[in-house]
Amino acid sequence: MSTNEIGSVSAAVSLTVNGTKVEREVAVRTSLADFLREDLRLTGTHLGCEHGVCGACTVLLDGAAVRSCLMLAVQADGTVVTTIEGLAAPDGTLSPLQQSFMDHHGFQCAFCAPGFILTAQTLIDRGQSLSRDDLRSEISGNLCRCTGYASILDSIEAAITDALGPLIDTSGASK
Amino acid sequence: MRASLVGKLVGSSVTRKEDRRLLIGKGAYVADVVVDGMVHAAFLRSPHPHAEIVRVDVAKARRSPGVVAVYTGEEMKAKTNPFVNFAMLAGLYSPVFWPLATDRVRMVGDPVALVIATSRAQAEDALEHIDVEYRLLRPVGTMAAALSPGSEQLWPKNGSNVVYEHTDTFGDVDAVFASAEHVFTERFSSHRQSNQPMETRGCVAEVTPSELVFHSATQSAHSLRWILAIGTSRAGAVDTLKALKANRVRLKSFGKSAKEFLTANKDELSKNDNAGMIHQVRRDPSTLRHIGRLFSNTLALDARRLPRVVAGDIGGAFGVKGHPSREDVAVCAAAIDLGRSVKWIEDRVEHLTVGGTARDETITMSMAVDNGGHILGMRADLVVDQGAYPAVPFGAPLFTRIMKVMMPGTYRPKAFELRTRVVATNKAHYVAYRGPWANETWARERMLDIVARRLGMSAVEIRLRNMYGPDELPVKMITGPTLDVEMSAKATLERANALADVDVFRTAQAQARESGRLLGVGFATFHEAAPGPPDYADALLPGGGMISSEPIRTVLEADGQVSVFTQQVPHGQSHETTFAQVAADELGVPLEQITVVFGDTNRTPFGLMGTGGSRGGPMAGGGSMFAARDLRKQIIDQAAGLLEAAVDDVEITDGTIHVAGVPARGISFADVAGAVRREGKAELASSVSYDGGRGGWVQATHVCFVEIDADTGMVSIPRYVVVEDCGDLINPAVVDGQIRGGVAQGVGSVLYEKVAYDAEANFQSSTFIDYLIPTATEIPAVEIHHLQTPSDKPANFRGVGEGGMIGAPAAITNAIEDALAHLGVTVTEQYLPPTRILELMGVIARSA
Amino acid sequence: MKFPGFVYHRPTSLDEAVELIGRLGGDAKVLAGGQSLLPVMALRLGQPEHLVDISRVSGLDVLAHDDGVVRVGARVTHAQVEDAPMVRRYAPLLADAMPWIAHRTVRNRGTVCGSLAHGDPAAELPAIALALDASLVARSVRGERIIAARDFFEGFLTTSLAPDELLCEVRFPVVAPGTVTLVSEVSRRHGDYAMVGLAASLRLDGAGSIDDVALALFAVGSTAVRATKAEDALRGRTLTPDTIATAVAALREELDPPGDNHASPAYRRHVAGVVLARTLQGFAADAAAISGDAA
């Protein structure tokens, strides 16, 4: 589409998804989320609200977390996309973050899981020091209706601690 | 983490069996289901709260690209049977209604037409080409309007918007109130809230050459199956008679089962005097005609055409997916009509609009007390707004029966009276939401604080003075059920009081007030029938005992694995893990050797309860224990022969069956299964129908600490403590997760979430920008302390699914009032957003 | 909730983009990050016939400090602004706003110019543009037009951008030395649109008297607004409790905020004053600390 397909209702897109080059013709009104779920059958990306609030559809686009419901597939042309299916090793070994979520009973129904895991992955990738409150704030764009978030925070905190060292301790700080 | 600890799994936070697939994106939720030739559904929904449908023109929509079919309400009516309530209560009018609106719409979002197209996008496009002419009716937008005799009637056959009215009286209420030194009265109101699981509702009606498979996010696969069968079996009288004749065998077998059922439940059934049915038929005689037809239609249905319901992974529900929906029946009927598979995945706007709402109630409560703060009597007037349509198969009227039983809590009033009215308004229907009766706790615990403050007592003092203690047990609640010797509500309160250290807090609170900071603490104690004592069900309803048993089937499979089949449909509760823990311990095998099978009506035992009512742990957990225990006995019997040993000498260690003390003389479960097969015997299996044994109560005290920003009205929760007793914990991490999740929803209820309508019933919260689900920055850390009152109950598990949500609104609102009490504030509303806080404080004027 | 159909265009040069928008006029919407436009389309509240995706238009990715202004091109995302030390240094009020804008996931796609062109009265950036007297650069086949922020926001989701114009860039004047800034808001939940928000910029002269002040409020009307009466109450004064009280009273007097399901008009009016008072008290405390340090 980069050449001259101006004014189209469908377009060819070429992108890398979980390390695999993908080329498809898509209707331009197709969201990235629906493209992943329906055209590529990567149904790990979930649609919770389709208006950009709940975060369940979060994927990594060139390494940054984005809402795949608020993006057209055609806008992802030329990008590198990582979905929840792209985190575990090919032999099925969970990523450290996924393993931490298992160890800490991170989720219940887990419909929100892909969004939380990918959002949390960017925190590890960015390598910034965070406090527990920072962590709350960083994941506040993702809704979970089951857990009350404590187990999600515990899971992420443990994975960050393993990867980057302990969180910043603010427990002694005054209000 | 400790999944290989054989025999000690119960009580350990083993990692979840369901997690691997869910964490790598390989869960199978209903939206993920794709079948050959599938087409997609979208519903045209009413923009008006109340209107007559004058004309529906779908001609243009039928020509819209990709459209396969369009059904109007009348067209769908011709292909379906209506929804008719079977759980008739004396004094209840339950309207007969259809999958799509026919003559009128009664709420914003009422489904008016169904479009089937090759993609959901095209189906949505076509909706814009449907032209509906409405004649607007006066909307009934408030409870007060519904109670007013002059209001427009949603269901004219009832003659009123009050669809249920009933009064229950226990003890001599008038005498107690007349003699009391004080009577305090307050009117409490809660607001419309919504479950809002992260996954909306949805289904795929898959048409195959041999069967109709209905993939669904449902909490109750078997009840959905029968609702679909009833709804979609519509046939003409002649065809029905022919089919009934042709199906004589089936008719006979039905007759036999009916007879068995009637015999088995003779006592329960005799308690019902049919007053409910008489009340209903007097108002709408067509009820009988519809029941007759749908009953004969369903009976005439070829057994192979009974829908097979399959539930996969489910993205939460909290009650809303326990109700088979009008959309389910419409989609299923369309699939049958078209002979094509049809998928419907509700979008969030639909789910917020008509997915299901709850808790819109007012409770005017009076307490008669003496000078010592003893509660002598309670009287309450409850009004519930059930919205436009009753929930299927039961909704608000039934939940008021639970409120009736539970409202006195674990206190000892000598008399109690509850007047109940359920009204219809032009709002979305009222569904079960996590502890659907919870407002009995909220109103009572709120009232106790108000009474205590007026008598100059502390919140803890008034509760301790009135609560049944261990030395008084067992004792019957005034409403009927027995508080057994393990009932430990008072112990949870005492422990919570110690943990809260209220004296220290009061000093801090006083100092904070000096500098303009507002701190508060609130307590709430409740008990919950999860599953409740044996006499609980009868206290709810005459004949209520019929529905209380839980089927579990265990099977030794050919490969040595043990399957546990359940009618429960887990949707986040971790049943695949917890039932396996219980069964594995009984059998002496590792967790990996157990597979919990759920969701498929062709494979799971029949049960209409599904997952709900906090029954999973106590009922299915208990059932798993006994079904595994029985299977173990069968396995040992078989193994004894193979090992040439006496049965008493055979034991199971770490998954190996061997002669006691001689681990080398052992065989595997697969060996036993193989021997059974070689001998031509039936597979080893055990089916139990567990009645809950002695049952019992789960109980808890919540303590909430708040700080209120006096300038902005923002409420924060620096500390939240739960002390609870659910008996033995199968998996502590799962238990804690349920409690925390419930508390989080309670926080949402009080501070963030409101299903908003204007006074004319126009809907105003159709997005997640309007309906605020709390995020990680709003939910406090919750400290949980478990009491485990010793018990000799063989399966000492009690349910924890709902309790967090039952206790939280009371504890939070009590804390808020405590923070504002010095300003003379009395909190009688459940929804307290920042604007309302500043209004209560007198900082700003009340908005219109 | 699927997007309605549209025709998609992806020009690569500014001339091409401007020509397209000129030709399609009111039937077209510009798509940059899509974080405001696509939700509207998903809800079918807007159904543009054409989308002109400017993500490949060259020259719109400028994020630079240049000739007394900080230039932010139409393709620049909130996240890029948030991560740029240059912005923190030269346009601190703009940097202050970033963490308040939704969540990082949205900021990774959403653009500064997109938010301005959308003109949501509850959003942060229109207020920032007003407070800083930003200039908005619009291009059409008719040429380039520079619009002052105060002339840009005309009403609820309405700007003075003509249907054939593309907002190419916004220019924020570089902060004057000695200026203190703060963005502060009260919202229902973290990341929500504000119930009340304030973008404040203030400079004290050597004697501690206020020689420049800008107060822009958001979520209190049909557009973001400058609180001119409160500014007047501050200009030339020192930051005493009395001055602050006068400014707060002036602010509450001049606002006429709307009510909605999240906050009543009275709440917004009251809390606007609270936010202003706290902001000014913070500035006063900072100033005292600085002069204390100097002494």
Image (tube, helix red, strand yellow):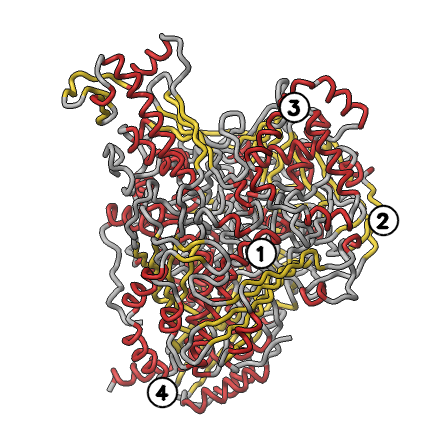
Q: Which residue occupies the foreground of this view, B242 or B705?
A: B242
> Which residue is disc 4 drawn over?
C206
The mark lying in front, picked from 2 and 1, is: 1
The mark lying in front, picked from 3 and 1, is: 1
Crowding at dot 1, Cα within 10 Å, few <14 / some 14-19 / many 20+, comes out as many
Q: Quadrant of the N terminus of chain B?
A: top left
Residue type at mark 2 is: Val
The mark lying in front, picked from 3 and 2, is: 3
Query: What whole-number distance in Å separates the C-alpha atoms at marks 4 and 2?
Result: 75 Å
The mark lying in front, picked from 4 and 2, is: 2
Q: Which residue occupies the foreground of this view, A134 or C246?
A: A134
Residue C77 % position (x, y): 47, 54
- Mark 4 falls on what kind of element? loop
Q: Residue at x 31, y 71 (%)?
A: A175
- Mark 1 falls on what kind of element? helix
Query: What whole-number distance in Å separates the C-alpha atoms at marks 2 and 1?
Result: 36 Å
Residue A51 % position (x, y): 56, 50
Q: Residue at x 45, y 86 (%)?
A: C244
In the rendered structure, the residue with mark 2 lies on which chain? B
Q: Is residue B341 left or right of residue B610?
A: right
Residue B405 % position (x, y): 51, 57
Q: Is residue C275 left or right of residue C222?
A: left
Identify the mark at residue B54; answer none if there is no mark.
Answer: 2
Residue type at mark 1 is: Thr
> Which residue is disc 3 drawn over?
B305
Q: Residue at x 52, y 58 (%)?
A: B772
- Mark 3 falls on what kind of element? helix
In the rendered structure, the residue with mark 3 lies on which chain? B
